[in-house]
Amino acid sequence: MHDSLRGKVVVVTGAGRGIGRAIAERFAGAGSAVAANDIDPETAAGTAAAITDAGGTAMAAPADVSDSAQVAAMVDAVMAEHGRIDVLVNNAALISPMLHFLEADEAWWRRIVDVNLTGHFLVSHPIARIMAEQGGGAIINMSSGGATRAHRSFTAYDATKGGIEALTRAMALDLGPYNVRVNALVPGAIDTSGMTADERTHRGENVPLGRIGEPLDMTGAALFLASDDAGYITGETLRVDGGMLAQQRSATVDIVRPETFPAVEGL
Ligand code: NAP
């Protein structure tokens, strides 16, 4: 799958665990050289080591994506190692803490905006310039269902994700003439925190495909959008959510419950 990714240099932010790690490992499996970023140098190194142990090519690229000096040093390190960057996956984000809007404070708002939205800008900007000079590249931003349907106590997070979808379209317009494509992925409910069996069942009931997502579920779409197969796709927002955003009401409160659906044998 996606032969065009062989030999490409891919930077994945927030790759120390969760969705970012799964995406980094899948790119490495497709023959790409991966720079695994994380704010935590140990988890970044852990992802890079897992990839190299499996026979792939990877380097740890630790940096706080909200700190432009750290980002510049990270980009310099990747360029010193590989001399080019073909794909950027802006995945790093703060998902917690959750705060009710009435209990929110400025420091909470600023930190989440700094990491989730400004971080996308700070990493994308130097890398887009490198891609433009090279003659092309692909950038994938990580949105959330929160961009279009709110989560309770997630005002800052949801606002950053709406911003990321707007940023994706705006970057796609500015970077299109340089053959740099910019798209966004919208994960659904992906178990990256080690949910209990009960939580997985409960969350899965509300997904039209009937199950919670795994980090691996995000990887095929990421590789596709980065590959030459997506060469005419830019400014797009692709949901990888088991159908969650397609539904009007979640299954547990819908009038027509899934357990009343016809049995396969009766069809
Ligand atoms: P996760 O497990 O919390 O992983 C996020 C990674 O980003 C962590 O390794 C974290 O490091 C790192 N990180 C945090 N702040 C950073 C910074 N300033 N600089 C560099 N790295 C930083 O999250 P996830 O569930 O895999 O989510 C990945 C992406 O998908 C996020 O953009 C998230 O908003 C989006 N998403 C996830 C879901 C879901 O259901 N999981 C749903 C919708 C959207 P530390 O852990 O060391 O802080």
Image (cartoon, rainbow, N blue to C red):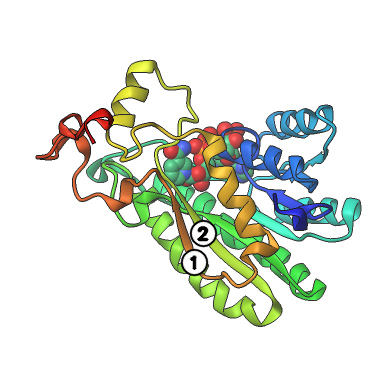
Residue sticking out furthest to the bottom? 177
Percent x, y for residue 201?
33, 23
**74 above or below 228?**
above
Task: Indicate which disc, 1 or 2, sits on the residue closer to the N terminus.
Answer: 2
Residue closer to the observer: 256 or 72 = 256
Percent x, y for residue 130?
78, 68
**201 above or below 69?**
above
Residue 66 in sight in this render? no
Percent x, y for residue 167?
49, 67
Q: Which residue is under mark 1?
A: 236
Question: Where residue 184 is drawn, which disc sits there?
Answer: 2
Q: Secondary structure at mark 2?
A: strand
Residue sticking out furthest to the top? 197
Residue 172 in sight in this render? yes
Q: Residues within 10 Å of mark 1 (few under 14, many from 20)?
A: some
Do tag 1 and tag 2 residues touch (Cβ < 8 Å)?
yes
Residue type at the position of mark 2: Ala
